[in-house]
Amino acid sequence: MTKVTELLPGTLDMLILKAVSLRPLHGYGVLLRIAQISGDALQIPQGSLYPALYRLERDGLIQAEWGESDNNRKAKFYTITPSGRRRLKEDAASWDRLVAAIAAAMSATPSEI
Amino acid sequence: MFTRLRSTLAAIIRRDRFEHEMAEELRFHMSAYSADLVRSGIPPEEAERRARLEFGAVESYREECRQARGLRAFDEIRQDIRYAVRQMVRAPGFAAAVVVSLALGIGANTAIFSLMNAVLFRTLPVGNPESLYFLAHRSGNTDSTTSSNYPLFERYKAVDAFSGVAAFSEYTFEVSTADGRERVDGQYVSGNYHAVLDVPIALGRGFSSESDRPSAQSAIAVISDDYWNRKFARNPNAIGRTLTIGGRVVTIVGVTEPGFHGLIPGWRLDITLPVALRVVDEPWFLGARDGWTSLTLVARLGPGTTEGQALAAADAVFRPFWMEPENAWARRDESTVGRSAALVPAGKGALDLRRRYAKPLGVLMAMVGVVLLIACANVANLLLARATVRAREVAIRLSIGAGRARLVRQFLTESLLYATAGGLLGILVSFASTGAVVSLFDTGEMPIRLDVEVDGRVLAFTIAVSMLAGIVFGVLPSFAATRVDLTRDLKEGAVVRHGRVAMGKALVVGQVAMCVLVIAIAGLLAQTLRNLRSFDAGFERDNILLFNLGTVGAAITPEQRTALYRELRSRLGGLPGVTAVAMSSRSPIDFSAQLRGIAVPGFQGKDEGASAYVVTPEYFPLFGIRVLRGRGFTEQDRAGSPAVALINERMARTYFGSSDPIGRTFRFLSEKELATIVGVVEEVRHEQLREAAPPTVYTVMGQPATGLDGTVEVLSNVTVEIRSRNDPRSLVAAVRNEVRALHPEATVWYARTMRQQLDAALIRERLLASLSTGFGLLALLLAFVGLYGVMSYRVARRGREIGVRMALGATRGLVLRQIVRETMKLAAVGIAFGLAAALAATSVVSSFLFGLSPHDPAMFAAVVAMLMVTALVAGFFPARRAASIDPMRALRAE
C-alpha cells in the first residue's frame, strides 16, 4: 500500500483541471483519474470534489454536459474550456517554480550559506 | 465576472433543475463507487453503506455546492425578506406606523425635489441647448436680459461669433372664439427664432424668415402641443387652419413638440407669432430707441467659439451702442454708467424663475430633509424598542449558531423593506401633493405654469432617499439588537438594557432639536407672509375689484375711446353697492413697470427717471392715497386744458429738494409738451411691497399724451378699479354685461380683488409660508410621536419598578409628576440644542423675512412654548398609565 499524502491547499483545482484536460470525465471519474495519475498517493475526500467542480464550472474553467457513463447510466461529464486550459498552464508553471524553489531550499547544505 | 453572474442567474432562475441535477450527480457518484466496491468483492449492502460513509456529509457538501454557485447569498436574502415580511405581518400596527412616517417624509422630499427639478434642473428640449446664451447687459452684479430693443438686436445679428441670434418677447394675445374673445399666452418672435434655437417641430414647419418687415407671408402662427390638443384635439389638419388674433387672421403653419415651452420657464407658450405682425400695428417697433421694448435676445455661439470670444464680440457691439446719444435716457442712473455686455447661459431657459426660486426651494429642501431625519429617528426608535422585545429571539438565534453579521444583515433587510414600502407610498404622497403646490404658482395675471413630472431624475432621487433613510434608521437598531447577553437575555423578562435606553433618549433629544429648527423657520416665514398681507403699504386693499379692459385692435378713434371710458365709469358707478370707480394705466403691485425718462427744466442733478402712472381723478380717493400739497386731479383736467401732473414726495425731494414743486414743470423725454405739477401725494409702495416707492409721476387720463411725432394716443389697455360696500367679487358678472353692452370688441380679463392681486405678487412668500408650516406641523407630529413612544415604552418596561415604589408608599401623583418631569427634561435638552441650531440657521432665511428679525424673540418664545406643551401632552398619557399601575398586580406578574 502506498503512503497517502494530504493535499496542499489550493492544489485541488489544479488537479481537477489536469484530470479533465486529458478527456471528459464525470465526478467519480475525476476522483479515479487523480488517484490513478498520482499513483494512489493523493487522497481526496470524496464529497469535497463537488463544491470544487461547481466553483470551476461557475468560473468558466470547465463546462458540464449530461451524457452516458461506461455502464450506460446518465452522468454529468466535465470538459476543460480554453480558459481552463490557460489556467492549468499557469498553475502548472507556478507549481513547478514553487517545487523547484522549495527543493533548492531544502537541499541547501551548511557550506552554501 | 460575467460568466459567474450568468451561471448564478441561471441557477436562480432554474432552481429546481439545479437541485435535481445536483442530487442526480451525487447519487451517480455513490452508486458508481459502490458498484466498484462490489466488483472488488464486498457484499452490496456493505458496499452501499461504505460508499455513503466515505462520501461524507452529503447535505453540507450540497450547501457548499450552492455556495460555489453563488446561490447561498441569494437564499439568505430571500430568507431575510421572507422573515422580514413575516415580522411586518405579525405586528401590522407597528409596520403601519413605520411605513406612514416614512411615506410622509419621503413623499414630502420627492414633492419638493420634483419642483426643484422642474424649476432648476431641466434643460430645454432644443438642439444643442448648451451653446445658447442670452445677450444681456450687466451693471454690478445684475444682468438684465429683457432690456433691449430691435436696433440692438440688429447690431448683434451682424456679429460673426454667433451662428445666429433670435429675439422674442412674451405677449398675451386676444383670440376670437365662437363666444367672444379669449386671452392666450404666447410670444412674438423674430423670423429666425425656430431655426436659430432648433425648436423641435412636431407638425408642419417653424418660421423661416430672416427679415422682420411685414409682408404677405407674415400672417402665420406656430402653436404649442398643448394648444393643439385643447383647440384642435390633435387633428393634423390644424395646419392651414386660421386663428383670429386681435382682429387679424393668421394661418397656423406648425405645431411644436410636447416638451417645448419656450425659453421662459413658467410661461405658458401657446401661440407664437412673427414679430413682423406686431410691426403692422406698431410700425415704430423696429426703430424705437427711446426705451427697451421687452425683447429678449438669445444667441447661438458659432462652432468652436468660446464663451470668452463671444463675450468680447458682444461687448464690442454693446459698448458703442450704449454710449450713443439715443441711449441717454438709459444712462441716467449712476450705477449704469459702466455697463457691459453679458452672456447668460440659456440652456435651461431664462434665469428669472430659477433666480427667484433657487434659494426658497433650497430652504424648503433642507427643511424637508430635516423632517425626514425626524421621521427616521422615529422609526429608529420604534425599531430599538422592538429590538428589546426581540432580544430573546435574537439570543436564541445567536446561541444556535447564527452569525452576528447575518443577524445585522437581517435587521437591515427589514429596515430596507420598510424604506421601500415607505418610498412607494411616498411617491403616491408626492403625486397627491405636487398638484396643490403647482396650483400655488398658477395664480394671478402672471401665473407660473410648471411642468412637474416624475422623470428619471426624480425617481432616482426617491430611490436614493428611501435607501439612505432605510440605512440611517436601520443601522443603529440592528447593531443594538444583536448586541445581546446570552445568559441574561435568554431569561424571560430581562431587565432593560441601559445602552439602548440612552440611544432612544438621544434620538428623541435630536428629534426635538430638529423640530425646533423646522418650526422656528416655519414660524418666521409664516409671520412674514402675515406681515406683508397686513402692513400699511399706503393704499387700501379691501373691497376693491380690479379688471383689465382691452380695446386693442378695435376700430375706434382716440376720442371715441376716451368717451367709451367715461361712459363705462358712469355706468359702473351706478351698480349696486359701488362707491367709487377709477381707471389707470397700472395698478399697485401688478407686476408692471414703467420707468420713463423725464426732463425737468432747471434741474441740475442726475436724472433718475420716474415711475409713471396715468390715472383718472378718482384713483387717489379710491385707494386712500392722500394729496399732501396742492390739489388732486378733477374732471376739468381734460383734453384741451393745460397739461397737469401729480408727483409723490420722493419725486419732490429728488427733483425739487426743499423748494416748492407746485407750479414747476417737467416733460417726458418721449413727449412734446411740458406738464405743470399741481400737487404732491404721499408715497405708497405700489411697485414692491418690500421697497419704498421710487420717484413717481401721475398724469391724468383725460389728457392724452402727444408723442414727439405729434401722434395722440389713448391707452388701449387700462385697469379699472371699483370700490364696493359689498363683496367686490359679486360684481364681476354685472361688469362683464356692462362692458359687452357698451362695445362688442371691448374685452374684460383678469377680474380680481386687490387682495388677490397682492397674493399673486406673494407667490414666493406663500409657497414658503404654506409649505414650511406644513413641514413644521409634520415635524411636531413626528416629535410628539417620538416622545410619546419613548415614554410609553419606558413606562411599560419599568412597570415592576413603579409597582414596587408604589407599594413602598409613592403616591400616584408622585409617579405621574415624575414621568412628566422626565419627559419635560428630555424635551428641554432637545429644545436647548434646537434653539442654538435655529439661532444660527435662521439667518439663512433673513432675506425672505419682512417685518421681523431672524432672531425674533416673540417667535422663539412661541416655538419653545409650543414644544413644551407638546412634550407635556406626550408625557402625560404615559404618566397617567404609570400612575394607574396596580402595585399588587405588577409585583405578582413576576
Image: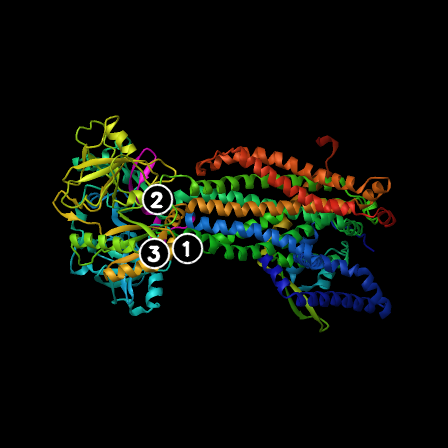
In the rendered structure, which amino acid carries the disc numbered 1?
A: Asp
First-in-chain label (2 vs 1): 1
Q: Which residue is mark 3?
A: B576
Q: Residue furthest bottom?
A: A72
Q: Which residue is mark 2?
A: B589
Name the residue rendered at 55%, 50% in the picture. B464
Disc 2 and disc 1 in contact, CB within 8 angstroms: no
Q: Is residue B698 above or below residue B94?
A: above
Which quadrant of the structure image shows residue B870? Answer: top right
Q: Badge 1 sits on which subunit? A: B
In the rendered structure, which amino acid carries the disc numbered 3?
A: Pro
Report the Cα–Cα distance between label 3 and label 1: 42 Å
Q: Quadrant of the N terminus of chain B?
A: bottom right
Element on which disc 2 rests: loop
Q: Which residue is mark 1?
A: B451
Where does residue B717 sit, x and y in percent of width and height? 25, 52
Task: Please name whichever residue, B577 or A45, is drawn nearer the observer in this view of the structure.
Answer: B577
Report the Cα–Cα distance between label 2 and label 1: 26 Å
Question: Position of B453 compared to B803: left or right?
Answer: left
